[in-house]
Amino acid sequence: MKQENIRAFSIIAHIDHGKSTLADRILEKTGAVSQREAKEQLLDSMELERERGITIKLNAVELSYQYENEDYLLSLIDTPGHVDFSYEVSRSLAACEGALLVVDATQGIEAQTLANLYLALENHLVVLPVINKIDLPSADIEKVEKELENLGFDQNDILKVSAKTGEGCDALMDAIIKKIPAPKGKSNHPLSALIFDSHYDSYRGVGISVRIVEGTLKKKDLIYMMDTKASYEVTSLFIHTPKEKEVSVLKTGEVGVVYAAIKKIEDVHVGDTLTIKDHPCLKPLPGYRRVKSMVYAGIYPMDTSKFEELREALMKLKLNDAALTFEPETSLALGFGFRCGFLGLLHMEIIEERIRREAGIEILTTTPSVIYQCKLATLEEISIDAPYKMPDKTLIKEIREPIVKASIYTPKAYIGEVMKLVQEKRGKFLNLSYLDQERVILEYDLPLSEIVFDFFDRLKSSTKGYASFDYEFKCFSPSDLVKVDILINKEVVDALSFIVHKDFAYQRGRKIVERLQKLIPRQLFEIPVQASIGNKVIARCDIKALRKDVLAKCYGGDITRKKKLLEKQKEGKKRMKQIGSVELPQEAFMSVLKMEKDE
Amino acid sequence: MKKEIAVYIHIPFCKQICPYCDFCKVFYEKGLVEKYLKALEEEIIETYQKEKVKTIYIGGGTPSHLTCLELERLFQILTLFQKKDSIEYTVECNPEDLCEEKLLLFKKYGINRISIGIETTIEKFQKKIKRVISKEEIRKKVELVKKVGFSNINVDLIYAFQGETEEDLQEDLNFLMSLNVPHISLYSLQIEKHTQFGYQKEKKIDPSLDRDLYDFLCNFLEEKGYQHYEISNFAKKGFFSSHNLVYWNNQEYYGFGAGASFYKDGIRGHHTRSVYQYIQEKKVIEEEKLGEEEKMDYFLLLGLRKEEGIGKREFFFRYQKKLKEVYSFDSYLKQGVLEEEGDFIRIAKEYRYVMNTILVTLLNSRKSS
């Protein structure tokens, strides 16, 4: 393919704004799949993605398209739609020259779309604004046009389509060919290829999705990855049309998948530059950074004997998900499990779900915690990824917590509500700007821990679902934080400890002990449930002793029934965790941990 | 020496059906009684292996509601058993059925223990369970029983009715004391699924209140010289129910009649609860054949109902294993939930009313061999 006839682009859209349907339509237009073949939303291949209607792993397809008697190659690179994956999004955008900004005609622009638009502009992409779902009766095309104009688009450039009916899609194809520039890389330069995705194939090892920025890549080339310094011989090269097709060479501007019998996914980092070992490019491609986990939680098997199975499941997931980290940890309360690091909450939920679904292991997840930096009195710096690891406060000089820059996009009617919420969440106001007459963008510095707590749900409920939200990590900042321990029968239950701003410690402690009081069944003795900071108890509830648990009558006819009754009680007890002399139902753990979301 | 055994006979016929009762029962019907007794006789002949019988317990239903003729027929059938001289031979009676003629018949056939179902003497609760009878009437009946020559008398009483107070219970107990009987069974009202109360969704009393009543009655009866020898049973010295102790000591027993349970040759089971099916085929439903571990579990869960608890020597004698090596008692002993005295391990008084929780932990602690 002639380099000047290559068009590489992404689709930027909010969840449900029709990205996948539009992609399907483009596939049809290029004849890559017939309408009958097109399973709904062909690009989303993971079962979970289809169910949730979101894209988690990236996909790229190579499509040939004839336009005015010229053959063109269209590379459509899919991007994940969620805030947790914004770095991945930025890398896949970096692999393109253009982007379609898809906006739902009935909804207008959302915060995430906007965030991704900025990412596209930072990567110097040509952005084609597309208003989708124009066939719907509730479509307000004019309003959305205004919003786009306010963002700086020319009204004449705005494409109006219905991905569902196909209306306007021909004009869209024309615009892709005419307006998105061809790749500019030099084919005679040493190879530099951008890694924008990876996945694991049990037969061929790690598959690396790359965009060839300069030079060419051939089978048997000895490749070298500049950050991880790993080196392998290419065993095969593929493109997706969307069916997999083996090729012998990937040329400048092309997108493909490289296999090199790589067993360690750690060797392949998204954003890294792939080159030729003996003939490397001078410097890596710009914009690379290592992804760091921001949210941590313990994952424990419900059945303690499934620890090894859980390890295997996590290892398998990690093969496909470089952003997941895990290491074994032991909790006095929960036994053996793993402390896992995630990009964010959605990422965490996806991993939990995949362990349950793909590995069939019932798990218990502890309260998610962000990562804290801690300067000790000895001036030593440590990172804390679990509340129980926080040293005694007398040993600490300073604690710093991650702060994010949050952009909240809301109809102006809810500004008051949003401001109230963000203030409660310790937000620091930065900026307010109007996108149009109806909608504003509020910018805040917010502690990440407050987002982990219950921010999403509160934001949604206080704006009747209208506000949307995006954030990016900004810095670590000193904060007046304390660790609150939960004591059951005077023993600290490590899995229930949490770190919280001093001002909220009492309130949160109170809530949790009250909840536990309701959840823990009465036992033989009265049990105090306390929340404490260091040695100081800040909240206490008592679980009264059990007063009656007996079969009053037990004669000849009652005996087997009594045994069955006890067997049933025994089953119930199996789901209990013994903490000292107290038995806690696992449900109690989960509800306490989950409570944070629903209260 | 032949093995000794206990025998339970079920007579399912009642004049009326009580709303709390979940035993096997039908309305009294003359023709049916005849057929039933015939089936009972056949079953005893087919099954009984000529062991020495140490206790017979005729329960129901309402055995006392049978006519004298029917009772005579029943007692005749029961002469099939080879009785020990020291046999305990009980018949359950409703107070209104007691008359001199029937009592003399009991005497004639060697019955030596009368169990009277009074249930409650408080009118509002009597109405609720449809068992209205005045205190005076009850007193007359009990005196008659004594007059005919029975000294081993039990009275059944139910407490923890919805709305029952300590004063109500006190009234029942005071009256009971005036009857001066040597054995009292006191049950907290259980609402069972397939009873009228169950269908009506009759509410249970608050467990904490139930416990208060229980503590009250235990203290009261102990003060009056009754020994609290099982969770719901109190007796003067020498009047413990031998038959019921067979159950709590996890010993074997025959059960004859519709719905009757048995534990024989290591098998626990029961008969069909349908009187008609019983008459036709005497159907038996085997529930479980006990292995050694189940036997040990039963020994524990039944034995701990007794005030004295379970004997370590007895356990070793039966199962050739040391009790403390099979189950772990240590932490409960340390906490004072269990007590060890000489050969026996028992539940401390304060914890007897929450024994299920304790049993579950103990059963879970069993080490499999």
Image (tube, coloured by chain):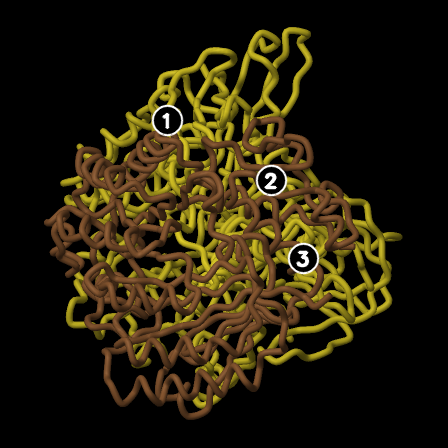
Chain colours: A yellow, B brown
Give the answer, above or below, for where B94 lies relative to A473: below
Which residue is labeled 2 in the image? A334
- Label 3 Cα neighbours within 10 Å, binned few <14 / some 14-19 / many ≥20: some
Q: Earlier in the sequence, mark 3 or mark 1?
A: 3
Let me know if residue A343 appears in the view: no
Seen from this angle, which residue lies furthest bottom? Answer: B280
Residue B351 versus residue A37: which sits nearer the camera? Answer: B351
Tag 1, which chain? A
Badge 2 and badge 3 in a common chain: yes
Tell me the distance, in whole angstroms, between the alpha carbons under discs 2 and 3: 19 Å
Name the residue at 41% across, 78% down. Answer: B258
Q: Amino acid at mark 2?
A: Leu
Q: Amino acid at mark 3?
A: Ala
Let me know if residue B146 appears in the view: yes
Name the residue at 18% across, 66% down. Answer: A139
Q: Are marks 3 and 1 in contact (CB under 8 Å)?
A: no
Q: Amino acid at mark 1?
A: Arg
Residue B293 versus residue A540: which sits nearer the camera? Answer: B293
